[in-house]
């Protein structure tokens, strides 16, 4: 009699184990598209018999495990910052590339039109219409430089805003990771914390996309996070990243405990935005300023050597620029010429009909006066367009390459942690069949006990 009840208890215990297996399999199937979900598996163990004459106690669930490959997780944390850095650069640089325009459709058109206007003035140096055209094209050229400078500065500001937004996201993520660390540290077994650890790993991945963080996994399941040697998360404590606006433009300097670490951020979207702001866009602005400064200097040098329509020694055509820094934004036609087009120089002598200076200025557009006499103004502009296009294409190609690496690691990781519907369907069938078999055994034991009880009572 006692053996029948033992068998009944064994069957009931086994039924629970197989039912639990079906529940876990169902959870895997339900979360096949859930971000961060790691496939669950159960450990079913034998229940040891109480003595050598017993057949055993059936089976029971020992633990539920989330399947993870720590090596691939760490590899992913190392590759993600490089991929997202190049992706952020490619995105920002593509906007700059679009704002600059194509060769023959941008500032080079204004350069050509300005010098062409002087060519027309050389044909008729006393024409008021030709002088008005020179003024108009000179003003258009200055405005084109002003607008182009504004667009590049706006690109810098946009990158700076992205830096500030990214740092805020990082602070939010580290706060959440610290809170999860607290929950994990205060809770029980790994099996009961699988869902929390999934969320923890998802947050760590998101943080790795933003910056080149270093992650240390502790024995109790918590993680410590640092960036450039500065702690961001230690146990259940998080430490905020700071931002300090720096002169002269007010761009953000990334700090930790009051110490700058901007130059030490080498990965993630944050590094990409910093590089666009501090390196790429700054380089483009410097090139544009240098071009604007040289245009003003060269034109003013030739213009001031001639005579205006009244026979007076001419002054500058463009308002003088003290330095190349900010030249593109400051470029403007000299106010004296705006007020009186007769002050535009065309003659090389005090004769209103002379056109020597007008011809020299017309030829200046095609004269290699830059880079030690090897490049024209149009060449310099073309070099700027090439630089932007090259940087954008390089970042895009690098991003694509690194995306492939990350995708391969994700594929390898999914082989361990991902949910396979085919495999889960097979597991579901396995647990279902085992449950049905145990149910039949349970019913057989129950029927035997019932029959025995009837016999004893009759």
Image (cartoon, rainbow, N blue to C red):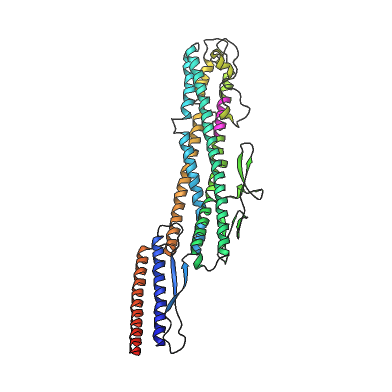
Q: Position of residue 112 (x, y in %)?
A: 47, 25
Query: Which of the 4 image quadrants contains residue 323?
Result: top right
Q: Position of residue 321 (x, y in %)?
A: 61, 26
Question: Is residue 36 found left or right of 232 in the rendered image?
Answer: left
Q: Nearer the viewer, residue 58 or 90?
A: 58
130 w.r.t. 379: above or below: above
Specify the farthest residue to the front: 458
The verdict on residue 67 being magenta is no
Q: Nearer the viewer, residue 135 or 99?
A: 99
| Residue at x 58% of width, y 61% of height | 182
Q: Quadrant of the N terminus?
A: bottom left
Q: Position of residue 149 (x, y in %)?
A: 54, 32
The verdict on residue 291 being magenta is yes
Q: Nearer the viewer, residue 153 or 306?
A: 153
Residue 216 shows up from this direction: no
Specify the farthest residue to the right: 258
Residue 200 shows up from this direction: yes
108 w.r.t. 260: above or below: above
| Residue at x 39% of width, y 73% of height | 18
Give the extent of the magenta segment: 286-296
Question: Is residue 413 found left or right of 262 in the rendered image?
Answer: left
Q: Nearer the viewer, residue 288 or 91?
A: 91
Magenta stretch: dominant secondary structure: helix
């Amino acid at each position: 009699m006692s053996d029948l009840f033992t068998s009944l208890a064994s069957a009931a215990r086994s039924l629970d184990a197989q039912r639990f297996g079906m529940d876990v399999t169902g959870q895997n199937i339900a979360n096949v598209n859930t971000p961060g979900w790691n496939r669950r598996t159960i450990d079913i163990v034998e229940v040891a018999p109480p003595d050598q004459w017993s057949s055993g106690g059936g089976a029971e669930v020992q633990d539920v495990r989330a399947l993870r490959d720590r090596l691939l997780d760490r590899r992913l944390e190392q590759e993600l910052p490089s991929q997202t850095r190049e992706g952020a650069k490619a995105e920002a640089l593509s906007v700059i590339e679009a704002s600059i325009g194509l060769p023959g459709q941008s500032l080079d058109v204004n350069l050509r039109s300005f010098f062409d206007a002087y060519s027309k003035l050389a044909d008729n140096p006393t024409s008021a219409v030709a002088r008005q055209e020179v003024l108009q094209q000179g003003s258009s050229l200055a405005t084109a430089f002003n607008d182009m400078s504004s667009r590049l500065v706006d690109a810098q500001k946009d990158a700076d805003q992205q830096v500030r937004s990214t740092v805020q996201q990082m602070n939010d993520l580290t706060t959440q990771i610290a809170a999860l660390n607290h929950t994990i540290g205060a809770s029980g077994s790994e099996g009961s914390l699988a869902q929390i650890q999934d969320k923890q790993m998802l947050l760590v991945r998101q943080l790795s996309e933003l910056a080149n963080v270093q992650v240390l996994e502790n024995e109790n399941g918590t993680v410590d996070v640092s960036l450039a040697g500065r702690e961001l998360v230690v146990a259940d404590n998080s430490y905020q990243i700071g931002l300090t606006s720096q002169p002269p433009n007010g761009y953000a300097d990334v700090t930790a405990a009051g110490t700058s670490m901007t130059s030490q951020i080498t990965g993630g979207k944050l590094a990409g935005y910093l590089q666009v702001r501090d390196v790429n866009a700054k380089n483009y602005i410097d090139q544009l300023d240098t071009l604007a400064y040289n245009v003003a200097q060269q034109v003013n040098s030739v213009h001031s050597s001639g005579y205006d329509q009244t026979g007076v020694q001419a002054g500058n055509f463009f308002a003088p620029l003290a330095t190349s820094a900010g030249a593109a934004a400051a470029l403007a036609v000299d106010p004296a010429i705006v007020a009186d087009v007769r002050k535009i120089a065309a003659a090389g002598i005090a004769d209103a009909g002379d056109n020597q200076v007008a011809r020299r200025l017309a030829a200046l557009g095609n004269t290699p006066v830059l880079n030690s006499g090897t490049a024209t103004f149009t060449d310099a502009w073309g070099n700027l367009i090439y630089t932007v296009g090259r940087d954008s294409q390089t970042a895009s190609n690098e991003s694509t390459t690194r995306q492939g690496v990350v995708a391969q690691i994700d594929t390898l990781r999914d082989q361990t942690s991902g949910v396979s519907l085919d495999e889960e369907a097979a597991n579901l069938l396995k647990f279902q069949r085992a449950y049905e078999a145990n149910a039949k055994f349970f019913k057989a034991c129950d029927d035997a006990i019932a029959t025995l009880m009837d016999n004893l009572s009759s």
